[in-house]
Image (tube, rainbow, N blue to C red):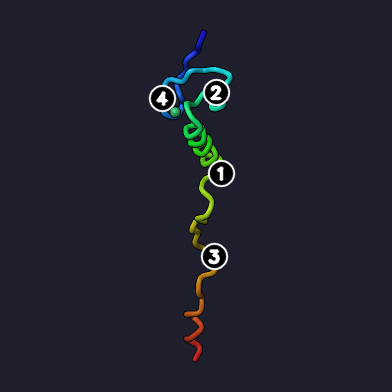
Amino acid sequence: MTKEVKCPQCGKPVIWNKDNPFRPFCSERCKMLDLGAWAMEKHYIPGEPAPEEGGESSSNDTDSSNM
Ligand SMILES: [Zn+2]
C-alpha cells in the first residue's frame, strides 16, 4: 500500500514512504527551498539594516553665524 502526497513546494505527487528522507517533499531541493522560505520568514534577511533617520544630523550650520 502506497500513500501519495503532494510536495508542498512544487506540488508534484510524492510517494510517501519511510525511505524518503525528504518527505513530504519530492526532493532535497524542495525541502531546502521550503526550509529556506520558512527561515527567511522568521528571521527576515540579514545584512541590510533598516535605514532609520533621526540620529546624528549635522547641526553645524547654525554655528557659522557667530562670526
Ligand atoms: Zn517538490
Which of the four quarters of the rendered structure image does ligand 1 lie in?
Answer: top left
Which structural element holds mark 3?
loop
Instruction: Please report whichever mark, 4 or 3, sits nearer to the chain's N-terminal start.
Output: 4
Tell me the number on the disc at residue 59. Answer: none
Q: Which residue is mark 4?
A: 11
- The amino acid at mark 3 is Gly
**Residue 27 pos. (x, y %):** 48, 29
- Spatial separation of the CA atoms under disc 2 and disc 4: 16 Å
Which residue reaches farthest top?
1
**Residue 50 pos. (x, y %):** 50, 55
Which of discs 1 and 3 lies nearer the camera? The answer is: 1
Q: Which residue is mark 3?
A: 55
- The amino acid at mark 2 is Asn
Which of discs 3 and 2 lies nearer the camera? The answer is: 2
- Spatial separation of the CA atoms under disc 1 and disc 3: 25 Å
Q: Which residue is mark 2?
A: 20
Residue 21, located in which quarter of the rendered image? top right
Q: How many marks?
A: 4
Q: Which residue is mark 1?
A: 43
**Residue 13 pos. (x, y %):** 42, 20
